[in-house]
């Protein structure tokens, strides 16, 4: 599923205009090109390279991710698209947990690109079902912290998790809200929705 998600992302990237590549994404401070660089920025690192990047980033996730993006700053859109093709099968850190890191990261960042560009898609439901539980557990996503004390329900997937006031909506929007995208959280409904929006800022 991670490989299929990256293949779908590469297909999208091949259609983007130069202006779209430089458009803002849902990731604060990152353009579309920066998000693409991030998606593949860990795949070529061995354990030594990964440790070096974490130390250079002082173990702060934003700094660590920023270093990976900076390493690809001079890449053209065609080169970045080729990198996504080259790394369709996740390797290194993104291949851990059976590729779940790559799947969750890929799904979220694919939508980080598509949503601001108003390029809608129907996310395959089996990918969302696999990604949602892992997004709640993965520390970098902070999903558990975002939805603590709430029950999140994907109305189109027959999936739910947690206890408390309910927050519900399509699985794609639930995943993006779990990942901290406040604007997407405003699309959700239920007695816990306002608290989630407030919590995300």
Image (cartoon, helix red, strand yellow):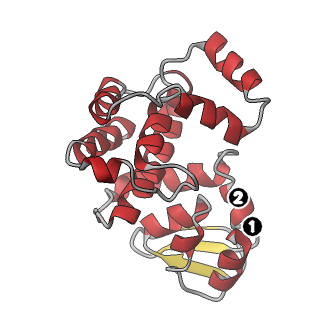
Q: Position of residue 181 (x, y in %)?
A: 57, 64
Quadrant of the image occupied by residue 192 = bottom right
Q: Position of residue 123 (x, y in %)?
A: 33, 59
Residue at x-position 52% and y-position 49%: 30
Looking at this view, name the residue that lies furthest to the bottom.
191
Q: Position of residue 5 (x, y in %)?
A: 34, 43
Q: Is residue 156 left or right of residue 195?
A: left
Quadrant of the image occupied by residue 156 = bottom left
Residue 152 vs 110, above or below: the answer is below
Residue 63 vs 157, above or below: the answer is above
Q: Is residue 74 left or right of residue 150?
A: left
Residue at x-position 61% and y-position 36%: 65
Q: Residues within 10 Å of mark 2 (few under 14, many from 20)?
A: many
Residue at x-position 29% and y-position 63%: 119
Position of the C terminus, as image quadrant, is bottom right
- Distance from label 2 to label 1 (Cα)? 6 Å
Q: Residues within 10 Å of mark 1 (few under 14, many from 20)?
A: some
Residue at x-position 32% and y-position 53%: 20
The residue carrying mark 1 is 148
Residue 199 vs 40, above or below: the answer is below
Q: Is residue 195 left or right of residue 118?
A: right
Q: Is residue 159 visible?
A: no
Q: Position of residue 13 (x, y in %)?
A: 27, 44
Q: Is residue 12 visible?
A: yes
The residue carrying mark 2 is 144
Evaluate if marks 2 and 1 touch, with contact meaning CB atoms under 8 Å apart.
yes
Q: Secondary structure at mark 2?
A: helix
Q: Secondary structure at mark 1?
A: loop
């Amino acid at each position: 599923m991670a490989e299929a998600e990256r293949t779908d992302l590469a297909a999208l990237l091949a259609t983007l205009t130069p202006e779209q590549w430089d458009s803002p994404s849902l990731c604060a401070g990152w353009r579309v090109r920066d998000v693409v660089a991030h998606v593949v920025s860990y795949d070529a690192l061995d354990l030594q390279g990964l440790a070096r990047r974490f130390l250079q980033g002082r173990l702060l996730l934003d700094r660590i991710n920023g270093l990976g993006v900076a390493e690809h700053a001079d890449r053209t859109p065609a080169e970045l698209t080729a990198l996504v093709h080259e790394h369709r099968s996740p390797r290194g850190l993104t291949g851990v947990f059976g590729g779940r890191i790559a799947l969750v990261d890929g799904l979220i960042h694919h939508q980080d690109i598509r949503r601001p560009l108003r390029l809608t898609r129907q996310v395959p439901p089996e990918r969302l079902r696999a990604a949602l539980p892992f997004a709640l557990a993965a520390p970098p996503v902070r999903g558990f912290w975002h939805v603590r004390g709430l029950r999140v329900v994907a109305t189109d997937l027959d999936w739910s998790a947690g206890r408390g006031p309910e927050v519900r909506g399509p699985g794609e929007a639930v995943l993006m809200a779990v990942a901290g995208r406040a604007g997407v959280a405003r699309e959700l409904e239920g007695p816990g929705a306002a608290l989630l929006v407030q919590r995300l800022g």
